[in-house]
Amino acid sequence: MQYTTPTSARELRAIFNSYVLPRVHSGEYFALPLPPTEPAASSGQPSGTLSQTVIYMNGREMVAFAHQFVSADGETGASGLPDPKLVLFEGEWLSVGDPPKKARTAIRTTQPPSADP
């Protein structure tokens, strides 16, 4: 089952950075960070860095799903911005490849029921 419309990583980041993050900063959307975990050794992250999933909400509706590394000093790693994995834009879920299992579960639990019988 296809949950999302494929797009490029560059386009997904651009939409997330220009559409989701400004709404978080204005208070229209809110970020719901999940408890951080130890990153996989293969990630190459420095000691003390944590891996974290963040769900972005508009009321009770999920509008984006992202990942970030958080350094020991509390800073978001790499670009300083979360890495979007899934974004709801103009009524479509956009992702690069298959979204993570957590994101697919979140889509199913936040999508309104289908109008089809």
Image: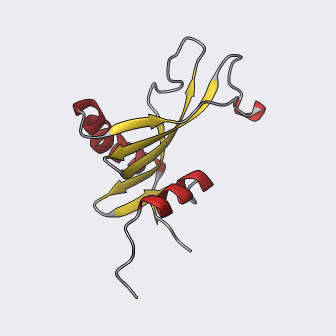
Identify the residue shown where x is 68% and y is 16%.
48
The N terminus, quarter of image: bottom right
Q: Residue furthest top?
A: 73
| Residue at 66%, 31% in the rendered image | 37
Instruction: Name the residue at the right extreme.
Output: 41
Instruction: Where is residue 83? Give x, y as percent.
Output: 49, 38
The relative height of residue 59 versus residue 90 in the rendered view (above or below) is above
Report the side of 103 relative to 64 (left or right). Answer: right
User: Would residue 57 be found to the left or right of residue 34 on screen?
Assistant: left
Which percent across, then down, holds residue 5? Answer: 44, 65
Vertical order, 57 against 47 (above or below): below
Residue furthest bottom as drawn: 117
Is 95 positioned to the left or the right of 38 in the image? left
Query: Which quadrant of the view contains residue 117?
Result: bottom left
Residue 99 percent location from the top left of the image: 56, 56
| Rendered location of residue 13, percent (x, y) | 41, 43
- Front residue of 94/50: it is 50
Compared to residue 59, the image places residue 92 above or below, namely below
Relative placement, left or right, of 91 versus 69 is left
Q: How is the image coloured?
A: secondary structure
Total marks shown come to 0
